[in-house]
Image: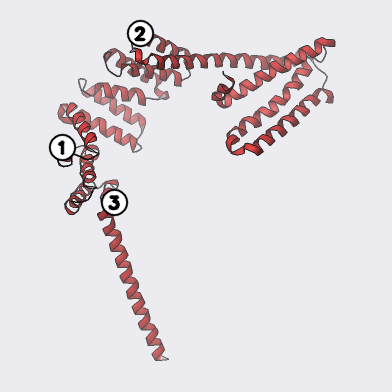
Amino acid sequence: MKRILMMLFSAGILAAAASGARAENVTAAKTALPRKTCAYCRQLMKEGKYRESIKSYRDFIRAERVKYQIDDAQYEIAVIYDSKLFEYDNALAEYGKLIREFPSSARRTIAAERIRYIKKHSGGNYAPLRRFEKLKAELFAGADRDTAVAKAESVLEDYPGTSLKEEVLLWLADNCGESGMEKSVSYYRRLIEEFPDSPQSAMYYTGLAGVFYSAGQYARAAAELESSLEKIPESRHAEVRKMISRAKRNIRRRYMLWVSLAVIILSVAGLFFVKPVLDMDAFMPGIISFCTCALSAALVFALRYQSLRKLVPLVLVLVPLFSAVPVISGMLVQKTGGVKRYVAGAAAVILLALAVSYSVIYYFNAHLLIVFRL
């Protein structure tokens, strides 16, 4: 018995040792593999250990001189100095090293463009550039937008002559959002007034109109676009005319909505003047209409549910409202006799059905009106 226990004990020790050895190998593999693939360097950067990441990239470059990722590693070193540490002199040196030592690298063009950009905005010992790039990085990481806007405005206040002025104004115009619509408009107007010869001037006019368009002020958007046709290159006229067309289309849609709502309100209000008899005969057309519409909709969705499932809420609202149309129309002409009753009833059904359908579709998804060329 003792011998058996000793054998089991020995076996347990050997198993534990083997397991420990395997665990050490796995741990070593996990540690070595990232370094071999440079994933370890990227992980350090993601953790905010930027200088450690740079050191690891340099070690990687020295150890893996023949690997194809070397130019990528060199590029990442430049990017860390550039967009993480905001040390632009070091970034320029590292971008330059990439271009010199890896002339066939796919990163070469990006590096050259970044060198050009940094040198162009190197005034003030990079201070305006550093502050502007930092606030954009903070916003991207989840910082408060209003705080970022305030910081951008302070860049312009502290450095009114900065070479970044046009870019900062455009960023402010694009980032004030609907909550700061008037501020956004004011920045676009400054861009138009202060940079009339800019290659991007056409974008400032369309951006200004876009602010009004997003706020539902389609008439102002159309007016701004029409006035811009005299000031922007002819190559952009077709694009601007399309935008004008869309703005005017939305104006027409809004007028049609008002007419539709007026038809619905007047039809319902008319019942108080007509004072119809409320019996089963009055509601029977609505019951038949509801059953027909509901069954038809159920059949269509059963056959094409995957492609039409987004329309389910629209149909759930439209079917009962649409079914009320023949009831209301019938009550409105209930006391009319002869042929007039059928003519007036048919006209009321058609008019009210169109008004109800248009209003429901407009409020659920106005884009669907394109199907009806509206």
- Sequence-first disc among 2 and 1: 1
The Cα–Cα distance between marks 2 and 3, rounded to whole angstroms, is 54 Å
- Dot 2, crowdedness within 10 Å: few (<14), some or many (≥20)? few
Instruction: Please tell me in which quadrant of the rendered image residue 190 appears.
Output: top left
Q: Residue at x 37, y 81 (%)?
A: 11
Instruction: Please tell me in which quadrant of the rendered image residue 333 appears.
Output: top right
Q: Nearer the viewer, residue 171 or 319?
A: 319
Left or right: where 366 falls relative to 14: right
Q: Position of residue 298 (x, y in %)?
A: 69, 36
Give amino acid for label 1: Gly
The Cα–Cα distance between marks 3 and 1, rounded to whole angstroms, is 24 Å
Q: Which mark is residue 230?
A: 2
Q: Secondary structure at mark 3?
A: helix
Q: Residue at x 55, y 16 (%)?
A: 254
Q: Position of residue 336 (x, y in %)?
A: 82, 11
Q: Position of residue 202 (x, y in %)?
A: 34, 16
- Dot 1, crowdedness within 10 Å: few (<14), some or many (≥20)? some
Quadrant in which the C terminus appears: top right
Q: Is residue 189 above or below residue 24?
A: above
Give amino acid for label 3: Ala
The residue under label 3 is: 39
Left or right: where 202 falls relative to 357: left
Q: Residue at x 15, y 39 (%)?
A: 90
- Dot 3, crowdedness within 10 Å: few (<14), some or many (≥20)? few
Q: Nearer the viewer, residue 256 or 61?
A: 61
Q: Secondary structure at mark 2?
A: loop
Q: Position of residue 105 (x, y in %)?
A: 22, 40
Give amino acid for label 2: Glu
The residue under label 1 is: 96
